[in-house]
Amino acid sequence: MSWECRAMQRVVMGLAVAAAAAWLSGCAGMPGPRTTGADAPSTETKDRVTASDETEAAKRARVRLELAAAYFGRGQLTTALDEVKLAIAANPTDPSAFNLRGLIYAGLGDDRLAEESFRRALQLDARDADTMQNYGWYLCQQKRYAEADAQFRQALDVPHYRAAPRTLLTQGICQARAGQWPQAEASLTRSYELDPGNPATAVNLAEVLYRRGEFERARFQMRRVNGNPDIVNAQTLWLAARIENRLGNRQGVQDFGTQLRNRFPQSPEAGAFARGQFDE
């Protein structure tokens, strides 16, 4: 696993943000279940939609989709797939079900069915920014960077899209994977501006700044992250040590290295520090 996803995955999962065992959920959020087509409430009514308005088919689909999402979140992908199949059988016009099916198939390594699922979700709702986000991340995993970036941009162009910080974070990580460092910095900086409290954004932005030689700015980000004891892990300490090494601060290197050895002695990062592999 490359540096950018390793940093994001471990920081996000350490904060107990929604994560799946086989898929980077910090990059791949899933929208809540919806009803569409014949089961969808009329757009002309002004009344509030309540449980009594839900058809039996829509209710079955919703319950199955909620179960599928729960199993997916626990990494039980085969069971999640069984449930999402039942959700689709009950309501074959719900794009959320196909979106989740795409995530599940991606996690199972079935690329053809994953892509078919995301495409079907977008056929059902061409303005579903959550599916665009997830499909973009899937394309990034396939190293189809230009196509991935197009999906992220389309998601960000959807009016009133409330998950823009997440999509900008994902876009920045993908751009870094493609070696597009200036674009990655711009995307991650914008994500940070919108959601400055997200440590995953700070870590990834610091790594990009480090790669670009912006060591003081990278130090600023990592001081914020490592200043929170609930967030600190082997990856954040190792990045901080590498930054201090670049700045020529030997005492800082030793301080972070000592924390790394004492707190995470069996980690690959502690091993890299012991070998002095700062630039690998």
Image (cartoon, rainbow, N blue to C red):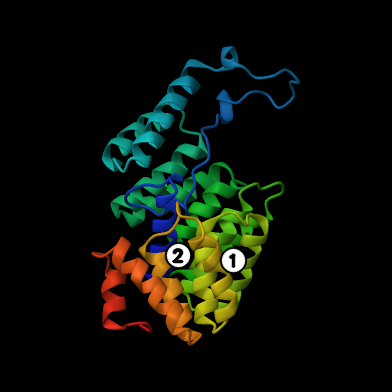
Circle 2: residue type: Cys
Q: Which mark is residue 51?
A: none
Secondary structure beneath dot 1 equals helix
Residue bearing mark 1? 188
Of 158 and 204, the residue lying toward us: 204
Quarter of the figure that contains the C terminus: bottom left
Of 272 and 35, the residue lying toward us: 272
Image quadrant in which you'd find residue 215: bottom right
Residue at 42% x, 64% y: name it. 7
**x and y, in percent, of residue 116 in the image:** 41, 51
Q: Looking at the image, can residue 172 be seen?
A: no
**x and y, in percent, of residue 102 in the image:** 41, 48
Of 111 and 23, the residue lying toward us: 23
Secondary structure beneath dot 2 equals helix
**x and y, in percent, of residue 271 in the image:** 26, 73
| Label 1 with label 2: CB-CB less than 8 Å | no
Residue bearing mark 2? 140
Of 43 and 213, the residue lying toward us: 213
**x and y, in percent, of residue 245 in the image:** 44, 83
Q: Earlier in the sequence, mark 1 or mark 2?
A: 2
Residue at 65% x, 56% y: name it. 156
Image quadrant in which you'd find residue 157: bottom right
Residue at 59% x, 60% y: name it. 168
Considering only vertical position in the picture, is 272 above or below 141?
A: below
Q: Looking at the image, can residue 75 be seen?
A: yes
22 horizontally vs 62: left or right: left
